[in-house]
Image (cartoon, rainbow, N blue to C red):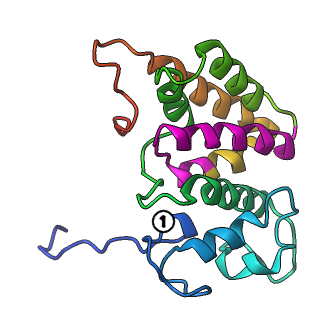
Amino acid sequence: MTSNGTKAATAAPRYIWELPLHPTRAGDLSGVNGAVLAALRRGIGREAGTVPEMWPYYRELNDSGTLTAKLRAEHLTMTLFAVHQQSNPKRVHQRQIGIGTAMAALRDSGTFSVEAIQRRFATFATATSLTEAGTHLRGLITQLRSIDQRLDYTQLMNDLVSWQYPGSVGGVRRRWGMQFFINQKSDESGQPSNQPEES
């Protein structure tokens, strides 16, 4: 409620991963279905804005055709979301689950070698290009699918925007590292995975 007693408006979904899952027709922007996800996966390994099937789903395209940091990050995030959501009836986007937190859940799942996950995550975090980072991250996202682990894709996109700038990449890596190591499995249940971080 606001100070005058009226209900605060809920922010409308902005990005494709924020839309509800629906068995909609291809091109219907009210939700996400298999055809939409297939269109997004066609962008894997392609330059942002060059895959016509993806055009209806961008929010960072611009009239000048400039390849901005936001457009690059949105493109990569859409393709990763499409890989993660594929054939999954449950929504994989969940706010407040950072990439480091999701990777900590993967590490602690018992499904994969702890050392292998730590190595792959470090390789992703220290990549020197967005293309290289995307390749490593796509493999990790595939592993997240196998343990039904969700992720905040809006935060991931914002991180990938900042990651492209020398002045902010250090802060992004520190945040990822903090999420990864502060979420070490410390209780007997060993089930930290799908719980949002404290805000």
Crowding at label 1, few (<14), some or many (≥20) Cα neighbours within 10 Å? some
At 53% across and 74% down in the image, what residue appears?
33
According to the picture, the residue beneath numbered tag 1 turns out to be 18
At 40% across and 15% down in the image, what residue appears?
185
Q: Main secondary structure of the magenta part?
A: helix
Q: Please state if 77 lies on the left or on the right of 86 as rendered.
A: right
At 74% across and 62% down in the image, what residue appears?
75
Pinpoint residue 23: horizontal percent, then vertical percent: 46, 79
Residue 180 found in image quarter: top right
Camera-side residue of 94 and 115: 115
Pinpoint residue 151: horizontal percent, then vertical percent: 50, 46
Q: Is residue 170 above or below residue 194?
A: above
Pinpoint residue 36: horizontal percent, then vertical percent: 62, 75
Amino acid type, label 1: Glu
**83 magenta-colored:** no
Residue 173 found in image quarter: top right
Q: Please state if 63 lies on the left or on the right of 25 as rendered.
A: right
Q: Is residue 74 above or below residue 146?
A: below
Pinpoint residue 55: horizontal percent, then vertical percent: 74, 80
Camera-side residue of 147 and 172: 147
> What span is colored magenta in the figure?
129-156
**130 magenta-colored:** yes
At 81% across and 37% down in the image, what residue appears?
166
Label tally? 1
Q: Please state if 126 lies on the left or on the right of 36 as rendered.
A: right
**Image quarter in which the N terminus is found:** bottom left
Q: Is residue 61 above or below residue 108?
A: below
Q: Secondary structure at mark 1?
A: helix
Q: Is residue 15 visible?
A: no
